[in-house]
Image (cartoon, rainbow, N blue to C red):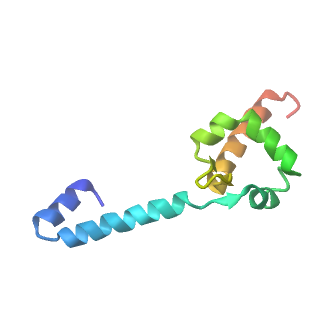
């Protein structure tokens, strides 16, 4: 919903509707961001890319900044968790860059 529409709802006396909408949108945003899995779970579902934990660790060390900027790695309670969607986008971007530098393709 556009900000001007929210303003219209509020000015028409529908503050509760506007507030409920904003709360639902906020909850959906948080739910999307909290799509977190353990490193082991992430690796298990990406075994065609990461054959073992060491291959993930190497990738993480080599691309740490990009993973952090994308929101792919998080430690909300002291335990490293992965956001699969964000991590996948970094994996694809890195793979594309690597492929572009190879002359055998």
Could you tell me residue 101's position as x and y percent?
Answer: 79, 27
Above or below: residue 89 compared with residue 1? above
Give the residue displayed 63% in from the left and 55% down from the top. 83
Above or below, 6 against 16 in this view is: above
104 vs 56, nearest the viewer: 56
Q: Position of residue 1 (x, y in %)?
A: 30, 61
Q: Quadrant of residue 104?
A: top right
The residue drawn where x is 53% and y is 57% is 33
Is 13 placed left or right of 72 in the picture?
A: left
- Residue extending farthest to the left is 12
Check the image and report above or below for 40 versus 95.
below
Left or right, 11 with respect to 26, comes to left
Q: Residue at x 75, y 55 (%)?
A: 39
Quadrant where the C terminus lies? top right
Percent position (x, y) of residue 62?
75, 33
Count all numbered tags in the image, as a single digit: 0
Foreground of the two, 91 or 96: 91
Q: Is residue 2 left or right of residue 37?
A: left
**Residue 30: horizontal and vertical position, in percent?**
48, 60
Which of the 4 quarters of the picture holds residue 103?
top right
Q: Residue at x 71, y 44 (%)?
A: 92
User: Residue 4 versus residue 23: which sits nearer the camera?
Assistant: 23
């Amino acid at each position: 919903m556009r900000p001007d529409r929210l303003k219209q709802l509020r000015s028409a006396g529908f503050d509760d509707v506007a507030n409920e909408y904003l709360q639902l949108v906020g909850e959906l945003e948080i739910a999307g961001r909290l799509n977190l899995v353990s490193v082991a779970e992430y690796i298990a579902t990406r075994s065609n890319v990461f054959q073992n934990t060491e291959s993930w660790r190497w990738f993480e060390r080599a691309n740490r900044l990009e993973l952090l900027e994308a929101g792919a790695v998080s430690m909300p309670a002291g335990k490293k968790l992965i956001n699969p969607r964000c991590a996948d986008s970094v994996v694809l971007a890195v793979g594309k860059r690597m492929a572009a530098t190879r002359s055998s393709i």
